[in-house]
Amino acid sequence: MAFTIRELLKEDRPGWENLWGGYLDFYGAPMEAVVIEVTWSRLLDPAEPMMALVAVDSGTHELIGLVHCVFHRGTWSIGEFCYLEDLFVAASGRNQGVGRALIESVYARADARKCERVYWLTHESNETARALYDKVARHTGFIQYRR
């Protein structure tokens, strides 16, 4: 499968909503329409410390993957960190290198910004994703807590 990775565009809204819905369904995380609207707005706002990239099927021109990132400062370095918050690939793009390409594109953009770290979370049961993540990053052993 041939595909390209590029920044999210305004005209991508229908395809992005389809992928975003698939991601939310995967995690069983229903989201209110207002949150989706604000997220979309933030992803397109150059003043926001966020970035969205999409994978586009070269033949059909359909979106087959997305990644959302948040850039932020931290207390452990002078440079920024890049939090890869969301990564999702449609069924048609899986096992085609799309997920890896999205992560590598995040790495390239984080490097261009001189980020000192790119990091993300996934559920411990997400074995398929973890098989890829173990190839492109180092598992640090940290456990997330929430309130």
Image (cartoon, grey):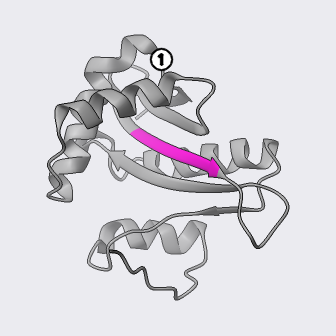
Circle 1 residue: 9
Per the image, is 114 magenta? no
Per the image, is 68 magenta? yes
Identify which residue is drawn at 32% across, 74% down: 147
The image quarter containing residue 113 is top right
The image quarter containing residue 41 is top left
Q: Is residue 28 left or right of residue 97?
A: left
Q: Is residue 30 left or right of residue 38?
A: left
64 versus 88 height, above or below? above
Q: Amino acid at mark 1?
A: Leu
Can residue 35 be seen in the rendering of this structure? yes
Assign a secondary structure to mark 1: loop
Identify which residue is drawn at 47% across, 30% down: 42
Q: Which residues are drawn in magenta? A: 66-71
15 versus 92 height, above or below? above
- Main SS class of the magenta portion in the image: strand
Identify which residue is drawn at 14% across, 58% down: 28
Identify which residue is drawn at 40% across, 35% down: 1
Q: Is residue 142 left or right of residue 110?
A: left
* Residue 15 percent coordinates (x, y): 29, 24
